[in-house]
Amino acid sequence: MSASAVRFGQTELPERQVEVLRRATRLEWLTIAFLAVTVTLVFLVLGNSQAMKAAWIEDLLSFIPPIAFLIAVRVNRRRPTPRHPYGYHRSVGVGHLVAAVALSTMGTYLVVESGIGLLSGEHPTIGTVELFGVSIWLGWLMIAVMAMTAVPPVLLGRAKITLARELHNKVLYADADMNKADWMTAVGSIVGVTGIGLGIWWLDAAAALFIAAGILKDGLKNLRAAIVDLMDARATTFDDREPHPLAAQIDEHLAGLPWVARAGSRVRDEGHVFHIESFVVPVDGAAPSLDDLEAAREGCVELDWKVQDIVIVPVRELPDVVPHVGG
């Protein structure tokens, strides 16, 4: 498939982003396959450990971000219609919101359940199982499974971070961020199981509470970011740490045109791409020609592949809500 055949709505992806999208899609399918194996193994050795139950539920929740990413990418390719003139880019934000709500809800439930278990003084037990004719403490199998499943998610998460930056995909970033922290869930589960084996009953409940708190933290963090984006807040970088620098680059480009005195833009994050309204104050109030406006627009589009949905509006004064460049 050539680069020209891959689009997000009307935005044609450059060859680099096409390859990044393919890699991200492969990684998400690989993540789903890994989670299927992990969920099965953890379920088989679950036992009575609260920490193991919390880890198993977290693994189940981990299916949501990659599935949301894969669905959003497919929906995102639809062309704009009269009913959806801005295209379907918001599918990324919807997927982000769905994943965040699921994480927040289950995290809250697990925090309450684990807290009740800790306060009530439940003393879980772990029995033995017959394996190849040998009686083995089930806790050893729990520890082995969690140790084996601790490292791959971290490697997957690190690989996804770079791809999320290049695609400007916040669902992929949320998934990567969760993957990178999965080793803490594995360690917490191992500590909880070890505590049961040593007779320190409260370690299991404390580990379950630690895992649940991590799920809730991820959920609330992503819930805030998803809601802010859907409310048309100023566009930020893929990790929500700072305003996206592309807005300033567009204003500087426009302000540098000979017929522009000042320029300022409103930039909305539609998912992978931006919707931009750029306001320009012409020099001496002279109205620019259509050729001037079209050349200015083409110059902005050339700055970055995400800048294809942009309108340039000549005005006498810039709106108060936009930062500006120029005199």
Image: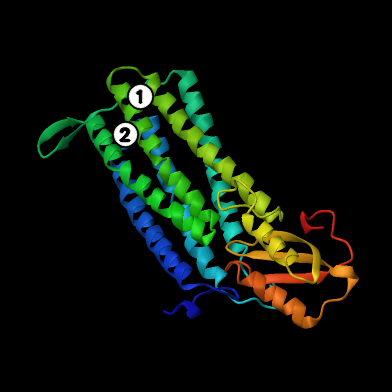
What type is the residue that disc 1 sits on? Pro
**Where the N terminus falls, by quadrant?**
bottom left
Colour scheme: rainbow
According to the picture, the residue beneath numbered tag 2 turns out to be 47
What residue is drawn where x is 48% and y is 80%? 5
Q: Residue at x 45, y 52 (%)?
A: 161
Q: CA distance from mark 2 to mark 1?
A: 9 Å
Q: Earlier in the sequence, mark 2 or mark 1?
A: 2
Q: Are marks 2 and 1 in contact (CB under 8 Å)?
A: yes
**Label 1 packing within 10 angstroms: few (<14), some (14-19), many (20+):** some
Identity of the residue drawn at 25% across and 28% down: 127
Residue 29 percent across, percent down from the top left: 38, 60
Amino acid of disc 2: Gly
Does dot 1 land on a helix, a strand or a loop? loop
Give the left or right position of residue 227, taking residue 61 as reference: right
Q: Position of residue 273 (x, y in %)?
A: 60, 65
Q: Position of residue 15 (x, y in %)?
A: 46, 73
Residue at horizontal 34 percent and vertical 53 percent from the top: 36
Q: Badge 2: how crowded within 10 Å, few (<14), some, or many (20+)?
A: some
The residue under label 1 is: 124
Query: Along the horizontal axis of the image, is 262 left or right of 200?
Result: right
257 left or right, relative to 24: right
